Image (cartoon, rainbow, N blue to C red):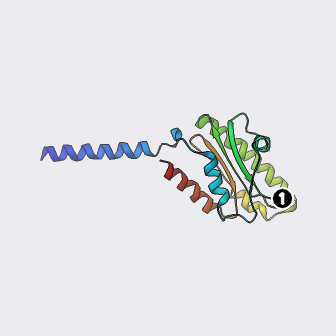
Amino acid sequence: MKMIIILTALVLCCVMFAACSAGDEADMEIDAHALGQSLADADIYDDLLYEVDDFVVFQIYNLSDYSSSGFAWAGTGATSESVAVFECADAASASGAVAALKDYRNSMLADFARYTAGEIEKLNDAIIESRGKCAIYCVSADASAAAKIIDDFFKNAE
């Protein structure tokens, strides 16, 4: 009976350890371009998104202090819809990038409030978050679907 209790406790400890280590996004290696492409290819936009040239990405989002690698997709300019994913050196840099992305979103809110008030809801629902070493920005017509794509991407990367 003691042996069964000990084995059961050991198995439970192993399961808990595996569950804790699998969910640690801070050390996870993510293909930022693939995540961005998954978001850009999704049917969650009113506009067509096009990949932005590498040298322009950091000028648009002002993240050169936080990241050395970033990928972005933007629409025609008629909407606020866009996607950007940045690979940062560590989780702290990704958090700093999120602050800069929020500043960018706030400037977009001011711009679109002047002439396209319909875009304000999309910008208010924008996904701006860090996941481990990644900073993510996504403005779409369906923020909940975008969030699911991001969640699924990270679950599949584990």
In the displayed structure image, the side of residue 123 where residue 116 appears, left or right: right
- Taking depth in this image into account, of 139 and 5 the one nearest to the observer is 139
On the image, the x and y values in percent for residue 11 come to 27, 46
Q: Which residue was labeled with disc 1?
A: 113
Under tag 1, what secondary structure?
Answer: helix
Q: So how many labels did they put on this image?
A: 1
Asked if 44 appears above or below 108 in the picture, the reply is below
Of 58 and 80, which appears nearest the observer? 58
Residue at horizontal 55 percent and vertical 53 percent from the top: 153
Residue type at the position of mark 1: Ala
State the residue at coordinates (68%, 54%).
138
Q: Can you name the residue that lies furthest to the right here?
A: 115
Q: Quadrant of residue 2?
A: top left
Q: Where is residue 77 in the image (x, y as percent from the top left)?
A: 82, 57
Q: In which quarter of the image is residue 121?
A: bottom right
In the displayed structure, does residue 112 sit left or right of residue 90?
right
Assess disc 1: are there few (<14), some (14-19) or many (≥20) residues with their C-alpha within 10 Å of its C-alpha: few
Q: Position of residue 134 (x, y in %)?
A: 61, 43
Residue 142: image location, x then y, percent: 66, 64
Identify the residue at image location x=31%, y=43%. 14
Instruction: Tell whether 90 sits left or right of 115.
Output: left
